[in-house]
Image (cartoon, rainbow, N blue to C red):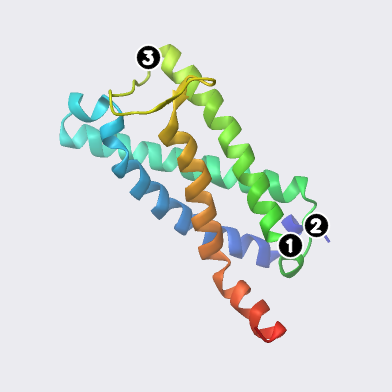
Amino acid sequence: MNWYLRAESWSLILRKYLPRLTLCSLIWEIVQLPLYTISKELRWKQLAFNVAHCTVGDTMIGTIALVLALTLCRAGKPTNWHRTKVGIVAIVIAVAYTVLSERINLARGSWSYSIWMPILPWFEVGLSPIVQWLVVPFVAWRWANRQNIQMQRFKRGV
């Protein structure tokens, strides 16, 4: 049976991964504020709205990337998921989307980088949004699966 037909799949995604992804994304968005010019241009209320807006967007990107990864990996029962493979595929999807999104939004003028943002010359996008999608989903995915990882180690006697 496919992963999306199983209640335990959606429970893991919605009850464990999604809240952890949202919290990690919120922290990342706050920490990277100095790398964008927006942090100097807006008042606190507008800044808070933008952080919330970006956090919701990050959560959507991360969740859609995970759903696509589970589908592409033909995941079945959650206890049989190849979690490392699913995590890597989700991260690749999120990074690819982010490169495209950053380029489009920079060209539109939706945001701009401060002098503190390191730029990746071959993509012409900031390093922080790319690193975000290497770190945040990894942390959220490991955190959401921590109990499963501990159970597997216990069963193996490690």
Q: Position of residue 138 (x, y in %)?
A: 54, 53
User: For the residue marked with disc 3, what is the amino acid?
Assistant: Gly
Quadrant location of residue 148?
Answer: bottom right
| Position of the C terminus by quadrant | bottom right
Q: Of helix, strand and loop, which one carries label 2?
A: loop
Q: Is residue 127 left or right of residue 50?
A: right
Between circles 3 and 2, the one closer to the viewer is 3
Q: Residue at x 71, y 51 (%)?
A: 70
In three-dimensional space, the C-alpha distance between marks 3 and 2, rounded to whole angstroms, equals 42 Å
- Mark 1 vs mark 3, CA separation in Å: 41 Å
Q: Which residue is mark 2?
A: 2
Position of residue 152 relative to residue 68, above or below, is below
Between residues 80 and 122, which one lies in front from this camera angle? 122
Amino acid type for the residue under numbered disc 2: Asn
Q: Which residue is mark 3?
A: 109
Q: Which mark is residue 147?
A: none
Look at label 1 and name its amino acid: Trp
Q: Position of residue 92 (x, y in %)?
A: 63, 40
Q: Quadrant of the N terminus?
A: bottom right
Q: Nearer the viewer, residue 79 or 8?
A: 79
Residue 57 shows up from this direction: yes
Q: Is residue 86 above or below residue 95?
A: below
Does residue 44 lie above or below 142 as drawn? above
Q: Where is residue 78? Give x, y as percent.
A: 71, 65
Question: Where is residue 140 drawn, in percent x and y?
Answer: 50, 57
Residue of label 1: 81
Residue drawn where x is 40% and y is 42% of the image: 55
